Amino acid sequence: MSLSDVRPQPVTVSVARTVQPGRTRQASAWAHAGQELAREWPGYLGSGWVRSAADSNEWHMLYRFADAGLLNDWEQSDERRWWIDSAADLVEVTRIERRTGIEGWFAEPGDALLTVPETVVPPRWKQMVSIFLPFFPLSLLANFLLHPLTKDWPLPLQVLLATCVLTPLMTYIFLPATTRLLGPWLRGKR
């Protein structure tokens, strides 16, 4: 028996998923969220996904762990289960393959263009700036417009109303627009 027979082998999982038509942006956000969850898990070595064409609904997702035991811990975790369940109406699994050793990162013949992108997480200070830029003027505007209506209300109710108005605006309109505009700066080298 050689030493390589004793050492645990890295395991790569390849999952083909079909994304529901018109749900590409949601699927991309979902895949990023899964990478962020897995990134903190013991034994995680990397992950990524590719599409065979820009208009393709078939996505090939890869993730790699240091050994089968650590992979199993991740796959049986409550975090992963929550993440998978969150995409029940978004994606459908069509094929799963597992490979051990280095060959797990290499594609089958004919798939020479397969690459594994790594998520770039901006430093927290850049995240803070990208939140502050839309939030400050929006907060000023909301307080200015709501003050005549709420000036006699207790402060906690004033803040509650402003929060209820601003949270969806920030989440669905202003933060996506800001991160899109600041994208090159946010993803720049640290």
Image (cartoon, grey):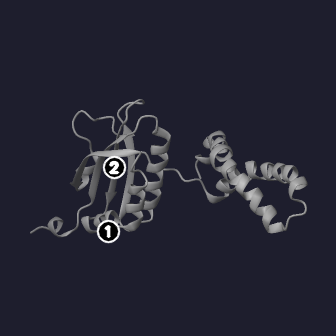
Q: Where is residue 75 in the image (x, y as percent from the top left)?
A: 32, 62
Kind of residue at disc 1: Asp
Q: Position of residue 49 (x, y in %)?
A: 38, 44
Question: Which numbered circle lies on residue 32?
Answer: none
The quadrant holding residue 110 is: top left
Question: Which numbered circle lies on residue 73?
Answer: 1
Kind of residue at disc 2: Leu
Q: Position of residue 135 (x, y in %)?
A: 75, 52
Is 152 left, or right, of 72 in this rendering? right
Taking depth in this image into account, of 28 and 99 the one nearest to the observer is: 28
Identified at 32% across, 68% down, the residue is: 73
Is 79 left, or right, of 2 in this rendering? right
Mark 1 secondary-structure assignment: helix
Is 163 left, or right, of 31 in this rendering? right
Compared to residue 131, the image places residue 44 above or below, namely: below
Q: Distance between the residues labelled 2 and 1?
A: 17 Å
Identified at 46% across, 50% down, the residue is: 30
Q: Which numbered mark, 2 or 1, is in the foreground of this view?
A: 1
Identified at 26% across, 41% down, the residue is: 107
The quadrant holding residue 68 is: bottom left
**What is the quadrant of the N terminus in the image?**
bottom left
Compared to residue 12, the image places residue 16 above or below, namely: above
Q: In this figure, which residue is indicated by the disc labeled 2?
A: 62
